[in-house]
Image: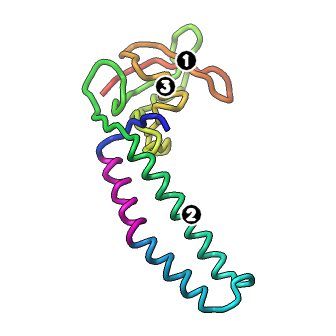
Amino acid sequence: MAEELISQEKFEELTKELEELRTTRRREVAEQLEYARSLGDLSENAEYQEARELQAAVEERIGKLEQILKNAKIVRGSKSDIIGMGSTVSVQRIASKGAPVAGEEKYTYTIVGAEEADIISGKVSYHSPLGSALMGKKKADEFSFHTPKGTQRYKILKIE
């Protein structure tokens, strides 16, 4: 797995989740398995099958978190004129001639790592088409990226 850029806050959140899974959640699942075993015939025991599936899901998440944290590179937002991880950017869609599209709103996004991405709260991954198109750009730059609806063109209004 390649190096994954991540904020300090997200690193701490994932570390806490991993610790919770390793200790509390594993124990809870083990207790559920033990109870299900006590019910008898395992081949027709729905509780046992559910507990096994839950155990597999917990172990899979633990493995994923360990991999992410192992390959994480913690980055801090920079107050720079160039867009990078942690930058908050305001953009507006433009027409092919560079003029704003009539009635088009301005959008504000924060560039984050893949684990932190949440488009509803304005956080886009630097791996996403929009995020990767923004990386390295400056205020007033125009850029485009491809979406299922076709190529979109935007202008950078502000970088925080």
**Colouring used for the render:** rainbow
Q: Amino acid at mark 3?
A: Ser
How crowded pointer 1 is (Cα within 10 Å; few <14, some 14-19, many 20+) is rated as some
Figure quadrant of residue 101: top right
- Identify the mark at residue 57; answer none if there is no mark: 2
* Residue 45 point in image, percent of width and height: 70, 84
- Residue at the farthest left position: 79
Residue drawn at (27%, 28%), measured in percent from left and top?
Answer: 78
CB under 8 Å between discs 1 and 3: no
Q: Earlier in the sequence, mark 2 or mark 3?
A: 2
Q: Position of residue 114 (x, y in %)?
A: 47, 40
Residue 144 numbered mark, or none: 1
> Is 151 above or below relative to 148?
above
x 47%, y 44%: residue: 118
Q: Residues within 10 Å of mark 3 (few under 14, many from 20)?
A: some
Q: For the magenta stretch, what is the residue range?
A: 9-23
Mark nearer the N terminus (1 vs 2): 2
Residue under pointer 3: 132
Type of amino acid under label 2: Ala
Q: Between label 2 and label 3, give the one nearer the viewer.
A: 2
